[in-house]
Image (spheres, rainbow, N blue to C red):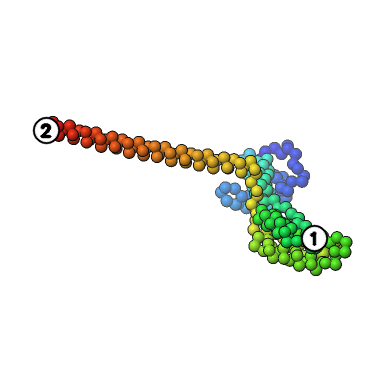
Amino acid sequence: MKPDKRKVDPKSQYRINEQIRAREVRVVDENGATVMSIRDALELAQERGDDLVEISPNAEPPVCRIIDYSKFLYQQKKRAKEMKSRQVKVEVKEIRFGPQTDDHDYNFKLKHAKEFLEEGNKVRAYVFFRGRSILFKEQGEVLLLRFANDLEECGKVEQMPKLDGKKMFLYLAPKKAGVAKKSQQKLDREKREAEANALNASQKAKAAEQVEKSGDGLAANAKGLEALAALKFDDSE
């Protein structure tokens, strides 16, 4: 066990070495798991030149690993960073209607909402009632229900239309996890690569065609030489 001269972060969720209070622990390594006294576990860690790290304090007995504590923390941070990078960032996109939205405006907003849901984002659609238009709240509810029905293929209702002050809200979530949009730089790079591949394929096809033509020419020349040789042979007779 390494001399414990370094400062241990009091906010850390892991106990190490003499900080472990259990009388016996389950030590896990590449050879399996072994239950032993805390004294034996500390001696084993000392022999290996590493630390005894308590990774599951609520287990019975607590589970520990023998590992360099700094390396262990680095691995934990790296794993957390990888998990975070894999997560798709979900945003809430807003769609606003009036109680008497015409069909053109409705279809335009429906198209955008569909795009938002297919990208994996949530949609908060609401009808804003200005002044006396609150009298048409039933009309606003019908509009939002129609909106949810038109998006049922790509979205599911999280909250039915609900009036909050002068706004009636409807919440929709994507039916399946969205795929993060590719950056424009990546799209341009992929386009260039596709064009280069197409150009290479075209050049290869032309080269093959030229080889084929040259082959036909050589065959024709060979046949001509054969005919000339036969003619000369006949003359010699």
Q: Which residue is mark 1?
A: 98
In the rendered image, the vertical position of residue 213 relative to residue 92, given as above or below:
above
Look at the image and tell me whether residue 111 can be seen: yes
In the rendered image, the vertical position of residue 199 relative to residue 28, given as above or below:
above
Q: Residue at x 73, y 48 (%)?
A: 13
Residue 81 x %, y %: 67, 45
Q: How many numbered discs sit on the rendered protein?
A: 2
Look at the image and tell me whether residue 38 can be seen: no
Residue 217 x %, y %: 32, 36
Q: Residue at x 40, y 39 (%)?
A: 209
* Quadrant in which the C terminus is drawn: top left
Q: Label 1 amino acid?
A: Gly
107, 27: nearer the viewer = 107
Q: Dots 1 and 2: beta carbons under 8 Å?
A: no
Q: Which residue is mark 2?
A: 237
Which residue sits furthest bottom? Answer: 138
Residue 176 x %, y %: 64, 58
> Along the polypeptide, which appears first: circle 1 or circle 2?
1
Q: Residue at x 43, y 39 (%)?
A: 206
